[in-house]
Image: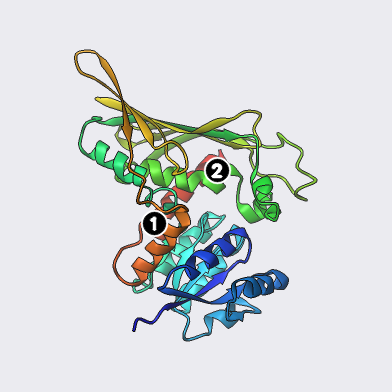
Amino acid sequence: MFNKFNIGVIGAGMWGKTHISMLQAEDRAAVTWVYDMNPAMGKAAQEKYGVKRVAQDVREMLDDPALDAVVVASPPSSHAAIALDVLRAGKHLLIEKPMAVHREEVAAIVAEAAAHPELVALEGSCRHSRLNPKFTFIKALIDSGQLGRIYHIHHNHLGQGTFVEYNPNGAWAMDKRYAGGGPFMDWGEYDLSFHLGILGDRPELKAVHAFTVTGLRDLSKLAPVVDVEMHGAAYMEFDGGLTYYYERGAGVHGETQCETRLYGTKGGLRFYYTTWEPKTIEYYHSEEKPVKEVLTVDMSKHPSHDNIAFVAHFLDCLEGKAQPLMPVGLAAKHLNILFDILKS
């Protein structure tokens, strides 16, 4: 009989609870530990989900020889130190995005993962990107040559709401010390994972010109510190002649959908890449005259929640059936681009 993977979850907030519930729905996994910096939250999660043990500190969990893997879903500023401890303890790692809030921390995680090639180290941004049927569909279309050379990407997604309104217990996400940034750090790794991934992860950044603005809304009743960017945009230049206009905002005085436009020398696409938005893709090209086709991506086999596919992928990696679709080294490339945008 197959022995389940024993998994510990660090962080008992909204996303940690999501991981626990979806791991428990998998017959290949058993959540045997939970830990949160707030002991009351850790205890509440243990009782709600029937987790065997609640840890008083991270080391107590990592010292369990029966523990196979750890999910890190605590606030981003805590990720690096925990991830290093997890890898040094010989445990497989699923780390939520962003995996760190400083370049030096990112480099340390990548180096530690490289020192333990026997361990899986999977980062969370493949959840909405590489595991998404739209990603596979669009990448295949580009790889076929039908669009020619992709020379420009245009992406924008703006909303009036912010993370703290989506998750009332997530006041930390408005404080740069803990979150690293606002919408760019919240969604940027998904965006870059998708857009650079459909181009085979080949583009290398040459230059970035950007702006960010904060203080567009008074959120003092929701969070004690609000200093993350609320709106920003970047014009990026990559090798091979690729340019990329990228705009993100949360708390902005306006709304746009999560729209991407790709421009190639033979054709172009307009689409919304997230799984819950329309599954149609507008395909523009020319024959004797300009043509617009509407393509439909088959989403019928994709689960109702993207994290179901993500958890299944992590377990596939643990079983040796798959390689991580977002190894920490590749995630570092995307994070460093975001650091460049925020620095600008």
Q: How crowded is mark 1: few (under 14 residues within 10 Å), some or many (20 or more)?
A: many
- Check the image and report above or below for 6 versus 170: below
In what quadrant of the picture does the C terminus appear?
top right
Element carrying mark 2: helix
- Check the image and report above or below for 335 versus 115: above
- Mark 1 highlights which residue? 326
Three-letter amino acid code at the position of disc 2: Phe
- Disc 1 or 2, which lies upstream in sequence? 2
3D distance between C-alphas at marks 1 and 2: 18 Å
Q: Which residue is at a point 47% across and 35% down the rendered structure image?
A: 208
Determine the residue located farthest toward the right in the rendered image.
221
* Residue 60, image quadrant: bottom right
- Mark 2 highlights which residue? 184
- Check the image and report above or below for 39 versus 74: below
**Residue 51 left/right relative to 24:** right
Determine the residue located farthest toward the top in the rendered image.
289
Q: Which residue is at a point 44% across and 49% down the rendered structure image?
A: 128
Q: Residues within 10 Å of mark 2 (few under 14, many from 20)?
A: many
Residue 69 in the image, given as x and y percentages of width and height:
46, 74
Element carrying mark 1: loop
Three-letter amino acid code at the position of disc 1: Met
